[in-house]
Image: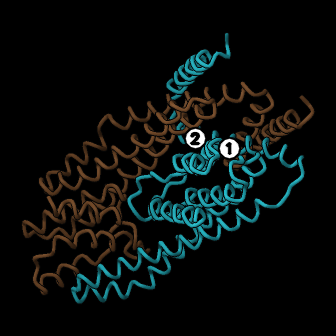
Amino acid sequence: MILRLRVFWRLLFLQTAFTSEQMQNRGFLYALLPATSRFNQEQLTEFMTRQNRFFNSHPWMAGWAAGLQLYALEHDEDATTLKETLITPLGAIGDRLYWRLLKPLSALPAALGVLAGLFGFTTVFWLGLGSGFLLLNLPHLHMRWHGLSRSLRLGRESLHLLLALRDGPLLGKLRAMGSILLGVLLAWLAAWQQSNSIRELVLLVGGALLYAGLLRQKLQLAVRLLLMLLIATCVIIAWPGTM
Amino acid sequence: MQFLLITLLATAAYLENSFVALTFLLRPLIALPLLGLWLGDFQSGLMLALPAELIFIDEHPLGGHLVPEPAPALLAALGGSLLALPAGAALNSWQQLLVLLIGLPAAWGFARLNRLQLLWNQRGDAAFDEVCRQGDRRGYERLFHRVLLRSAFAGWGAALLVTTVAYYLQQIEVPQWLVAYSAALLLAILGICVATIIQVFYRRQLRLQTYLGILAGAGLVVVMLLLRGDLI
């Protein structure tokens, strides 16, 4: 348990000595070092030389790989190839789950809270901020601990749990939730602007259009002209004194 | 004293968002309103939190890609700006815009700093390899702690720079028309944020849910306006 806690704590520093050659491996080896406290010098040298190789994954999913390495240490197996094999699935699942989904998703309630604060509702502000923070951190801390402890206990069997995470219904549900929250945010933004004046709403839309035009650079000429016309209209309407 | 605390906070945000933990306690959406609350300008903190977070919401550190760091940059810029004001005063819209004008390039600057850290780490690679070859556990941990400390110092230096720049730039007097226009520009920037976040989710083609959400949001707004007494 103490070992697990120490590895968990050190895995927080996974990205510290990030290099383009070994990527996260410096931090990964640093996290594994507490497990070697009972090694003699020869074993330690052998272990550190063997582990001194490329590793990269999602920072929150690295617990699975670390747990498997510790399991192999306990049971005297060679898990060096397993470490390499895990790089791609851990990175892919983690990136999709956290960067592409959970990070924007958790930003939405916090953004709603901030808008409520601009409306003057302090309680809703704290609620939104807190729920956004928890929405990101409870799953991520759970995943760090869960990945480490499950793979430490079950060894290679734990990989089934990892795959279930990828194929399960969780992702779809979270996405639907994100879309609904996005709708709420849009309605709220519009209402916040509407309560001030129509000019500001127009500016908001103009900024969005400008950005969309910048992003989609391979637009057809007609579409681009239309976008420019729309932006120009926005600028004219929003010019101080016209409305 | 407050100056020092603000730079330390920005350093913590820098470390937290790129090297250590990644709990996002110090991400701009959460940290900026709290900083505003601390320094006595809650509204500016709220107003700047949305662009600071949402404009970079689509930047993911996938596969070692270095992303802009809005948290330390905006924390330092807002902190420095609020210190430049007389106590208890709030930022006007030009000053808010100036925070963004300093903070957004500084966010990319922090990404460049990360690239620099990568080069420094690369230079220290041989030492790490040597320690691994000798099986020197203590030596490895010492090297690792040194890297952490160096990152912290680099981040602190950058935060100090941004805070100082914001502190001095905020003292320049500007004409009144600029203040009027910057309110409009802030809104346009907010529009860009909205476009970014729509782009993140709308690509997934869950249109029905988004419309449902708009309906729910409209209902919520009506309830809030009723509560505040604006409609009756």
Is B195 placed left or right of B134 in the picture? right
Q: Distance between the residues labelled 1 and 2?
A: 9 Å
- First in sequence: mark 1 vs mark 2: 1
Residue B57 visible at all: no
- Which label was assigned to residue B197? 2
> Which residue: 72% across, 25% down?
A194
Residue at mark 2: chain: B
What's the coloring here? by chain
Residue A57, by quadrant, is bottom left
> Which residue: 64% across, 43% down?
B193
Classify mark 1: helix, strand or loop: helix
Per the image, the residue denoted by label 1 is: B192
Q: Where is residue B84 in the image (x, y as percent from the top left)?
A: 71, 59
Q: Position of residue A45 (x, y in %)?
A: 18, 85
Is A242 placed left or right of B105 in the picture? right
Q: What is the display colour for chain B?
A: cyan
Classify mark 2: helix, strand or loop: helix
Q: What residue type is labelled 1?
A: Ile
Q: What is the display colour for chain A?
A: brown
